Amino acid sequence: MQFCELVAAVRNTPLDVTIPADWGQGRASFGGLLVALQYEAMRAHVPVERALRSLAVSFVGPVAADVPVRFEVEVLREGKAVSQVLGRVVQDGQVMTLVQGSFGAARESVANVDGLPAPEMKAPEDCPLLPYIKGVTPEFMRHLSMAWAVGALPFTGRGTREMGGWVRFDGGVEDEPLTETHLLALVDTWPPALLPLLNKPTAGSTLTWTIEFVQPLPKVSTLQWCKYLAVIEHARDGYGHVAANLWGPGGELIALSRQTVAVFG
């Protein structure tokens, strides 16, 4: 099932969506997809002129594949310019993911600071691709592509503070403008930056995720590569704190991300 088909499903029947196994990540469904679909359900309850400014996500439990999911929405407050919305990913009567979103209309301001510049990296065609390998890489990787440019690969024990490269959709995605929905999946495609520090395959998961968007979004196609860089700010006692940014192919800052990650080794 393609990304666009799942987006269409949540738009049509947000309280009855089934995530297929080919969007899996270990025993769970891909978190980036879940948040993207929850955002779509929330977007329908907010005036179109109020752009998504930020999401705060708590991954409570794993969402199983091939079991119906409800994407519930509650509008907490409608202010003059900002809407605060809460989303719940519910499966078998239990909340599996919480998403709190802030949507805000543009206003005049004297504060005007350009986004952080994109780091220098090799071009995607000069970087090794991380392919989908059945039984080795997560199932959802058949739908997305990563070109590794910064840092070591996961589980090599040669990781540093930084990890990154390029990311885009794969698997026959339609050529269309990149939206916040697409970006939520793209940013979460990259594995936790702590994994290259480990010297053998070890389970890891994201506990919390906050992501902020630079609005208005630049004009980027779903077929173009975006640049990603993650920086480990601290790691100890099985938990790590990672900040990351995503830039468009022209170097425009698109999104700022932060994750608290648990690793079991």
Image: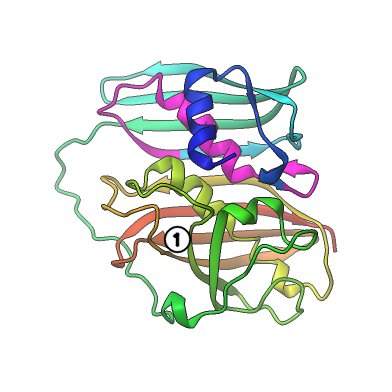
Determine whether the residue tagged by mark 1 lies in a helix, strand or loop.
Answer: strand
* Whole-percent x, y for residue 137 in the image: 72, 61
219 is higher (above) or lower (below) than 38: below
Residue at 78 percent across and 72 percent down: it is 198
* Whole-percent x, y for residue 241 in the image: 63, 59
In the rendered structure, the answer to whether residue 209 lies left or right of residue 116 reads right
Crowd rating for badge 1 (residues with CA inside 10 Å; few <14, some 14–19, many 20+): many
Q: Is residue 258 visible?
A: no
**Label 1 sits on residue:** 245
Task: Name the quarter where the N terminus is drawn.
Answer: top right
Between 109 and 14, the one nearer to me in the picture:
14
Q: What's the magenta region?
A: 25-54
Task: Name the quarter where the C terminus is drawn.
Answer: bottom right
How many numbered dots are placed on residues in this image? 1
In the rendered structure, the answer to whether residue 112 lies left or right of residue 172 reads left
* Whole-percent x, y for residue 38 in the image: 54, 30
